[in-house]
Amino acid sequence: MELSILICGEAGQGIQTIEYLFPNVLKDSGLNVYSYKEYMSRVRGGSNSTLIRVSDRPVRAFCRKVDVLVSLSSQTTHLSRLSDRIDSDAIIILDSDSNTKLYHNGKIIHQVPISKLALQAGNKVYSNSVVLGMLCSILNLPFENALSAIEKWFCNKGGNICEENKIAAKLGYENISTNSDLRIRKDFNSDPRVKEHLLINGAEAVAIGALAGGCNFVSSYPMSPSTGVLTNLAAYSREFDIIVEQAEDEISAINMALGAWYAGARALVTTSGGGFALMVEALSLAGAIESPIVIHLAQRPGPATGLPTRTEQADLLFALFSGHGEFERVILAPGNIEQAFSCTAKAFEISDKYQVPVFVLTDQYLMDTIYNFDSLKKVEPCFNHVVKTTDNYKRYEITQDGISPRGIPGFGDGLVCVDSDEHDEFGRITENFTIRKKMVEKRLRKLKDFSDEVPAELIGNEDYRYLILCFGSTREIVVEAVKDFDEVAVVHLQQIHPLPSNLSRYLRMAQKVLIVESNATSQLGKLIKMDLGFNNFETLNKYNGLPFYVEEVRDFAKRFVKGEI
């Protein structure tokens, strides 16, 4: 038993409140839930929507199909935009108290006076609570779970707001309960274990992962879709003693973070493509002074402002090749919420150990995805890589593995000298050609024997003939799309650079390879050609600003396996 429910309307109508409340109601009812929102770049108006999947089994991916559509608007323009996703027997509900019969592509539109019921409860803004009650009634869910969610969400709002929202939810619940055409006749199988699950989004997972990685300093300039990480860390700042700085711009933000690492902190910057573009010069500074730094880069469609509230995976090569000069970096790309936590935590350890920038590459899709899961895996405790300096301390001592002992000012007797100019082992400026050559080679040795911190992950049939390769947030979509295919396996990459050593073997074992990417130019494919010399693959790309639908990946994979592609 599974249903896909789409809530749509204009910005400012409270869809985000439903997006929070209803998944919590579903989880508290013992049901698995997945949620993803797609929204326009505006504060009021436009056409926004949130997809909520509810199922007896775990669900973690975006789908095209819509079984129930509820519009908080009285306009049918939202329906036209979503018409290709509405199932043939879907329930369509529109905010209207008109008695006129309405149809959309031959489907009847059920008109419910959502705004009128909200006004009856006390204010039109309570329309979202009316819809919450309606959804509970449509799915035959315990109404007390809706009341509990409203209590948690509105308890600190003051006045009669909490009680009036409860009244609004009750009015919505009762309105649907009297109309048998709007009720789902099948019951879901509730699992009491789900009630104890976590329910967080990708931005929260990155923030918590940063905490687990020892982050105690974050400096950023707000930029969608990365801002959620900054605000979540700000919320944790007092409890975990984190310095949070909203800088005047991204240039200041990354330089503050480098200063924090120099002083002994574990610092993070969180940004998106346009913001990272301003950080590139300081990224090279990190390469020159061999400073650790963790950069959370939440991708969105470009160039320029592009589609600032949509999703894409088009900054992979930008992260890889950004910066002037030659220096090493590591790129991690988590595939789901659990990995967003573990990758971010690991990023701090890798950056500190190897003294290189580490990217955590996400996107709007992952940042705004919500689903339930049982727990987060424990991560390794933070290891202190800072050394106590001596009188003869050399910050850039030539070593076999290229990693020099890193000291910080005030910890020991030595002088911790760093400089953006080329320097000798003590950190003093030099133009000696021999020293220059040794320093370049030292910096480039750091990842020569880089272990597979995150090996390529094989999912599915180990005796595969067909291999589908993906990275980052497309993981759960691809896995669900091909889960019932014979002779098909999925390889997902969390570690993008350096590429894991086991990837080449997986690729060459396959009869045919398909690479799935949310970009137009197959950036992962280009990287694999360049690094591994492997070019025997087909590609599936999407770059309209929406994530892949499970259905479109499934349909393409069927044709791929049949040899039609």
Image (cartoon, rainbow, N blue to C red):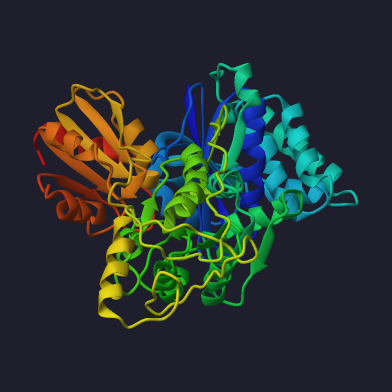
- The structure residue drawn at horizontal position 81% and vertical position 47%, both measured from the top left corner, is 120
64 left or right of 393 in image: left
Q: Position of residue 185 (x, y in %)?
A: 55, 20
- How many marks the image carries: the answer is 0
Name of the residue lying farthest toward the bottom:
431
Residue 86, by quadrant, is top left
71 left or right of 65 in image: right
Q: Position of residue 72 (x, y in %)?
A: 61, 51
- The structure residue drawn at horizontal position 64% and vertical position 43%, both measured from the top left corner, is 20
Name of the residue lying farthest toward the right:
159
Which residue is more in the foreground, 367 or 334? 334
Q: Position of residue 320 (x, y in %)?
A: 32, 61
Q: Is residue 84 above or below residue 301?
A: above
Which residue is more in the foreground, 105 or 553? 553
Q: Position of residue 455 (x, y in %)?
A: 33, 37
Q: Is residue 328 above or below residue 503?
A: below
Quick one: quadrant of the C terminus? top left
- The structure residue drawn at horizontal position 54% and vertical position 69%, both measured from the top left corner, is 416
Which residue is more in the foreground, 305 or 243? 243
Which residue is more in the foreground, 172 or 460? 460
Q: Is residue 342 visible?
A: yes
Q: Is residue 97 visible?
A: no
Q: Is residue 560 above or below residue 210?
A: above
- The structure residue drawn at horizontal position 61% and vertical position 19%, both measured from the top left corner, is 193
